[in-house]
Amino acid sequence: MAEKKRILNSDCGPCLRTYIVLLLGLFLPGLVLAADTLAVIYPEAPPPYKQVFDQIVEGIEARHPDRLLRYPLEKDYSRNHLLSQLEDDRVDMVVTLGRRGYSLIGDLSGKYPLVSGALPLTPANTVSGVSLIADPDTLFSQLRNLSPTTQRIFVLYTNKSRWMVDLAEKSAAKKGFELNAKRVNSLSDAVRAYEAILDQAQAETDAIWLPLDKVTSNETVILPMLLREAWDRRLVLFSSKPSHVKRGTLFSIYPNNQQSGERLAEMVRELYLERTAPGVEPSRSQNVGVNLRTAVHLGLEYSPSLTRSFYRTFPQP
Amino acid sequence: MLLVGNQNSLRKQLLTFLGVSIALLSLTSSIVAAWIAVNQSRQVLEHHSLQIAGNLAHQSLLSLITESKENAEPALDQAMAFNDVSGVAIFTERMSLLQQRGEIDWQSDNLPVWFAEEQPTLAADRADHWIITAPVYLQEEQGDYAEFELAGDKEQLLGYVMINVSKDSLQSLTTNLFSYNLMIGLGFATLLLWLQNAGLKRITRPLLNLSQSMNEARSSGEHNYAKVEGPMEVRQIAESYNAMMQVLEQQEDKLVKLNSGLETEVEIRTKELTHARDTALVAVRTQSEFLANISHELRTPLQATMGYIELVIEELEDEAMDEPVEDLREAMRASTRLLALINMILDLAKCESGKMELMPQEISLHSLTQETEAVIRPLASKKQNTFKVYLPEEDPVLQVDKEKAQQVLLNLLSNACKFTEKGTVLLSASVDDGFVVWQVSDTGIGIPKNQQNMIFDKFRQIDGSVKRKYGGTGLGLAISKHFTEMMGGALDVFSETGQGTTFVFKLPLTAPADPVSQNLLSKNSSSTDLEKL
């Protein structure tokens, strides 16, 4: 059975707190919504992943300081017990984090205003929330900063990642990039398509973008092949997945957990008040991770002030 | 030759025992070590081969995704670069061959079984090679932490890889390990044996020296002292041995001194005894000669006297003077008894001085016995005794001194008649195993047990009352005993007081071949008798 860890932000006890809220409700009707109960359901994760969820919750708390109830879930938590606990606690809004929280959507949607976070959500998902996937606009902005000579961007996508390419096309046009996007259906198609891209890509002016797609950015087949070929051909390779920076792509965007939490709190409040779904938003984080060794190999030089602005750099000392 | 046995030295036995133990230990440890090493090598090779198959599976992803033989080449080249890999093959998901390199023995029928496992596995273990297979999965990407992913792991089977791993190196390694280990083990055992031989030789040298000292002492009989050296126990033995030698030496010195004293003492005593013996023999001989001379000197006038008495009796009878005749006859009887006594003393003296000689002659048993019977029968009837004689049917011819044999019988029978009144006197003869045996039995007064061993002594009768009542000189049985022993026979007595007496007189059928020895025997007996006197 999951351990329910319910925490109230106020220092006073729940009875006293309820009493005060009721009094305020009598005399200050405009402030009632601020005192609605928000439940955050998230997995009990081991370090260092626990820190990610804690930062998101802190972001939520920043936007919803009152009546925030936390429900950390063990692996073998009891779903029914949790649901009954939510009812007992008179929860008004729910934010789920991670896959364990996302698995409760079927039980929670319709009962509570609900948003999700800490997942690579796409518009295909029925729930609203903030995705871990970085906004292409942010990626392209960083590309302009980190590789000023790049003019053309190649990207392969599948149906699942098409929404991101739609956003990217708008952003590319705005930032003066030529986005060369091609849809593929399978991994073998992707291999052949990348071989074709590699044949025509030019160093200094062309870059390859790896979207968050398990086919077109396959880490077993595609990523090693592209890393090797891009290194040999001195092509800029950047990715939507932060872990790829460590492996050799030029840069990627790391999510801003605090910011995501704040946005999740705002989204669930919007949903609670306006009863309209805000949909899935990409991560607006500006935290860029850069592989300096790749940059040096590509002949890119960054000023110290620019280097200091990087969220992470690799290889790490 | 090294053997464990009591006949071999301690060093050899120890060396044999240690040598065999070390050889066994070396062989066992060599074989076990080789076996463990081979097993570990086999496990390492198997593990290594499984890793090669896993890597090949991983590297075959691109070729299987694209189903491109060209893309398979780098992965196959890399797998074939391993020494033990003699063949590799990549199969599609449909188990159709995509690309093969080197020699690999597979049949289509085998593939469903070989490709059944979901991880690299040893599909077939042949005599000289292994077939190792591994499935090729395309695994969907997984982030650092599953909670940041929407879906779980998904695997897509793309195909299979197969490698043929030769066991040549393993077999070569096995042979080398066993042979080298055995050689090293035996070499080490030999070295240890040599070292132990040297060590044992040094350790057991003091013991060997001690043993040699002891052997020398035994063979020479001298009291050699051992050198005290070596380990504590050997030193203790050597010290104990030396102490024992010292004690033995002291005791032997004492014995030598005691022996020399004893020899002197014995020599003195022997001389004294010889002198005493010679003195006694001379005394006996002198006594016998004295008795013989005296008897002779007495007999001659006595016989003259008796002759004259006889003449006087005859003249007086002619003149019818009966009264003086009767007195003379009494004098005559007394003279006769005196003469008999003198004769017996003379015989006894002859016997004791060794001058009595045997004169064997041939006579039949019946004749000798009957002549004796004729002499005794009147005597037996005097005291109203019944005299019976029993002779055997056979009548062997005896070769004996007739006079002496008859005298013995007469002595025995006259004693029987003398000490028996109104009883029975029995004389029986028989032949038994080369001897003639006479038994003289009576139903007289008998002889007490405590006096039976004295009746053959000279001048001895059972007591004084007997002598007074029955008379006699006490020499008859002593003379009979002498005569019997001279003739190579035996004389024994069996008697119960009041029941009677039986004398058994036994003589050989033929006289002894060496009468001199019998004389000597008689002489010795006489000496004994003299000593008794």
Image (cartoon, coloured by chain):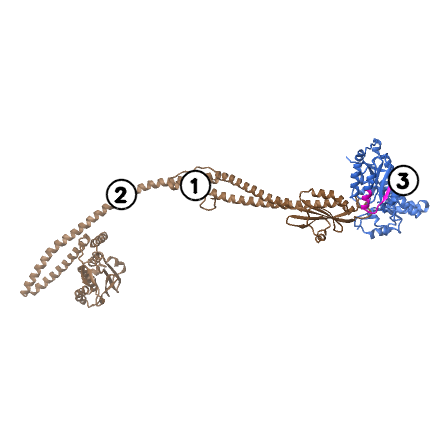
Q: Which chain is brown?
A: B
Residue for badge 2 = B268
Query: Horizontal and vertical percent for residue B373?
Result: 18, 65
Q: Which chain is blue?
A: A
Residue for badge 3 = A171
The residues bearing labels 3 and 2 have C-alpha atoms spaced at a distance of 156 Å
Q: How many marks?
A: 3
- Is residue A176 a member of the stretch shown in magenta? yes
Front of the two marks 3 and 2: 3
Residue for badge 1 = B211
Q: 10 Å neighbourhood of mark 1: few (<14), some, or many (≥20)?
A: some
Q: Secondary structure at mark 3?
A: helix
Magenta part of the protein: which range? Answer: A172-194
Q: 10 Å neighbourhood of mark 2: few (<14), some, or many (≥20)?
A: few
The residue lying furthest to the left in this view is B319
Could you tell me which chain the residue with mark 3 belongs to? Answer: A
